[in-house]
Amino acid sequence: VMDEHTCMVEVARFFMSFTQNESCGKCVPCREGTKRMLEILERITAGNGRPGDIEMLQELSETISATALCGLGRSAASPVKSTLKYFRGEYEAHINEKRCPTGTCKKLRKIHIDASLCRGCSKCARGCPVGAITGKIREPFVIDGEKCIKCGACLTACAFHAVKED
């Protein structure tokens, strides 16, 4: 059962990963096609999707379904086909806006500190496992986007709700 907090692009990536690992490798469409689809889906969920990725996924899914030798291969692209059909907007948001509408894809999270709400208590900085948050006590802290691993520890640590996720 999935709800509105489930990223359908990630669901497609998960199932493609499973299918790609289960492929026996005897036929090229399944062996190579699922590998390429998985690479594209991983790139999209990492925030590196490119224009044309959706069309390539559609083309690969049609080719694999039509030419694979076994039932696994013929059904391998089904999760991608159905998520593209019913949740195309999520794919477009990942690729064009570099955001995950459900907030599931960690690499697409954008976390910042609202300076107007930050009291400078340093609780967020102390909870950050990579030291990405800096500042002075009683002054607003800031997050270094390059260092941040988007784990969300700062979100839960802040008692003033100054740490925000876009």
Image (cartoon, rainbow, N blue to C red):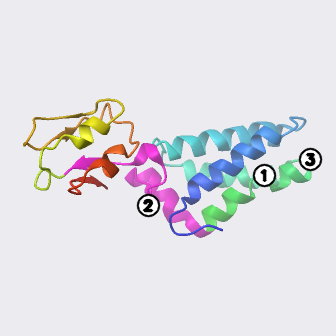
Residue 69 is labelled as 3
Q: In front: mark 3 or mark 1?
A: 1
Task: Find out whether residue 110 is within the magenta segment.
Answer: yes
Verify CB contact (< 8 Å) between mark 2 and mark 3: no
> In the rendered image of this protein, does residue 115 appear above or below residue 134?
below
Circle 1 sits in a helix, a strand or a loop, which is it?
loop
Q: What stretch is highlighted in magenta?
A: 86-113
Residue 144 is labelled as none
Mark count: 3
What x and y, as percent, mark residue 119? 12, 49
> In the rendered image of this protein, does residue 65 appear above or below residue 85?
above
> In the rendered image of this protein, does residue 131 appear above or below residue 13?
above
What x and y, as percent, mark residue 1? 66, 68
- Residue sitting nearer the eye, 97 or 149: 149
Q: How far apart are marks 2 and 3 (CA)?
A: 36 Å
- Few, some or many C-alpha atoms within 10 Å of disc 2 (few <14, some 14-19, many ≥20)? many
Q: Which of marks 3 and 1 is nearer the N terminus?
A: 3
* Residue occupied by mark 2: 101
